[in-house]
Amino acid sequence: MEQPPQAAFFAQVRGRVQGVGFRYTAYNEAARLGLTGWVRNTRDRDVVDVWAEGPQEELDQFLQWLHQGPPRARVEAVDAEDKIPTGAYSTFSIE
């Protein structure tokens, strides 16, 4: 039986984060860290939403990465809030 993730967060990343490969590189980074959840664009072209679940140490690394993003992005702010993990995701995906 698989153990549920230990922690989770929801984050909104603001800045020049759409049209610069942010979702794809976030997907790769989360997968590298073994996290589950998703990343998606919002209707506001300056915001990307992220839900991530997994071990706290890897979540911390991913959150740190979100503050920088890929080379073409310009992250101005990351608003992150700890959440209760759902265990509903088996992978990390782009929505």
Image: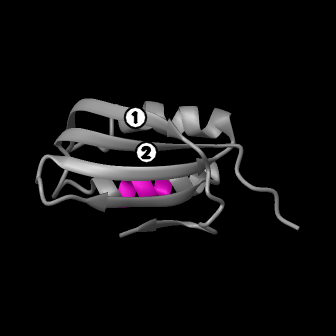
Tell me where residue 50 appears, x and y as whole percent: 39, 51
Dot 1 amino acid type:
Ala
Residue drawn at x 44%, y 35% is: 81
- Residue 91 on the magenta segment: no
- Residue 25 on the magenta segment: yes
Q: Is residue 24 left or right of residue 45?
A: right
**Quarter holding residue 36:** bottom right
**Quarter holding residue 55:** top right
Q: Is residue 6 left or right of residue 32?
A: right
Dot 2 amino acid type:
Phe
Residue range of the region highlighted in magenta in the rendering? 24-28
Q: Is residue 9 positioned above or below 31 on the image?
A: above
Residue placed under numbered mark 1 in the picture: 80
Residue placed under numbered mark 2 in the picture: 10
Q: Is residue 49 positioned above or below 2 on the image?
A: above
Task: Say which of 71 and 6 sits in front.
Answer: 6
